Amino acid sequence: MSESPERVPKLSKEEKDRRFQAELMPVLDPLYNFAYRLTLDEDDANDLVQETYLKAYRFFEYFEPGTNAKAWLFRILKNSFINDFRKKSKQPAKVDYSEIEGYYNTEDVEAEGDVGSTSSDMRQQAVRDLIGDEVASALNSLPVDFRTVIILCDLEGFTYEEMAKVLDIPIGTVRSRLHRARNFLKEKLEKYAKSMGYGSEEDADAAMTGDDDND
């Protein structure tokens, strides 16, 4: 919002309503999913989505036609969550990354295992099917900052550049945070994978979606 309000073209109510409906309302479902995964509460998620759309409507003249409406709405929702909902949330406080800096291996941030043979594909799919609920539980247990990057990247498919804009952090921080978040999940899922008869680290990786080739 770098332009002053008087320089932003004023839309008629009819044109504003038409464009708002056409460009922003199709994002309702993924926006609610994002809100629910942040708040872990249906009522809070609904309130957060409602607040996001109210803000988006109020400032719709600042939305540039043809740009990423989903990223714009996700950023508004994320800011609303931090400013309002996080204060009353029962989720853990913002994680202090310095406390865990030395615990995780930060090498090979770009590397996640490649897909192997057809039999390996089938085996990985079986793991995904078996521990889908466990993945959701592990994801929900992450500190919200880690949970957010997993949601944006692996569930919503945002690029690193888009994530950096949504979260207002450098791309390098996005990469590092995502790597650490995946390590959190990997640690939680390895125990479950072993209990289901899958003993290797790759089996735990199979439960997670996406890879680091997301630029």
Image (cartoon, rainbow, N blue to C red):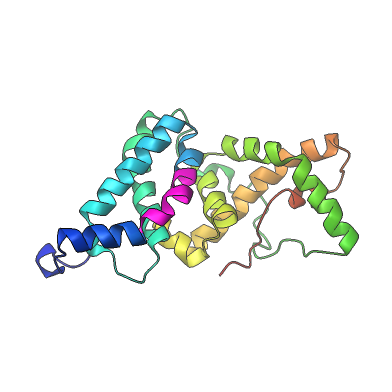
Residue 32, magenta (yes or no): yes
Can residue 204 be seen here? The reply is: yes
Rendered-image quadrant of the N terminus: bottom left
| Residue 32, position as x, y percentages in the image | 45, 44
Bounds of the magenta segment = 24-34
Q: Is residue 67 left or right of residue 181?
A: left
Q: Is residue 134 left or right of residue 26?
A: right
Rendered-image quadrant of the C terminus: bottom right
Q: Is residue 87 above or below residue 117?
A: above
Which residue is at a point 41% across and 30% down the rendered structure image?
43
Comparing 196 with 99, the one in front is 196
Numbered label tally: 0
Can residue 170 be seen here? The reply is: no
Comparing 196 with 174, the one in front is 196
| Residue 115, position as x, y percentages in the image | 79, 64
Which residue is at a point 61% across and 50% down the rendered structure image?
180
Residue 96, magenta (yes or no): no
Q: Examine the image and state in which quarter residue 15 appears.
A: bottom left
Q: Is residue 87 above or below residue 213?
A: above
Q: Is residue 201 left or right of residue 162?
A: right
| Residue 136, position as x, y percentages in the image | 63, 39
| Residue 17, position as x, y percentages in the image | 24, 57
Q: Is residue 2 above or below residue 94?
A: below
Q: Is residue 49 left or right of residue 198?
A: left
Magenta-drawn stretch, dominant element (helix, strand or loop): helix
Comparing 82 with 7, the one in front is 7
Q: Is residue 95 above or below residue 72?
A: above
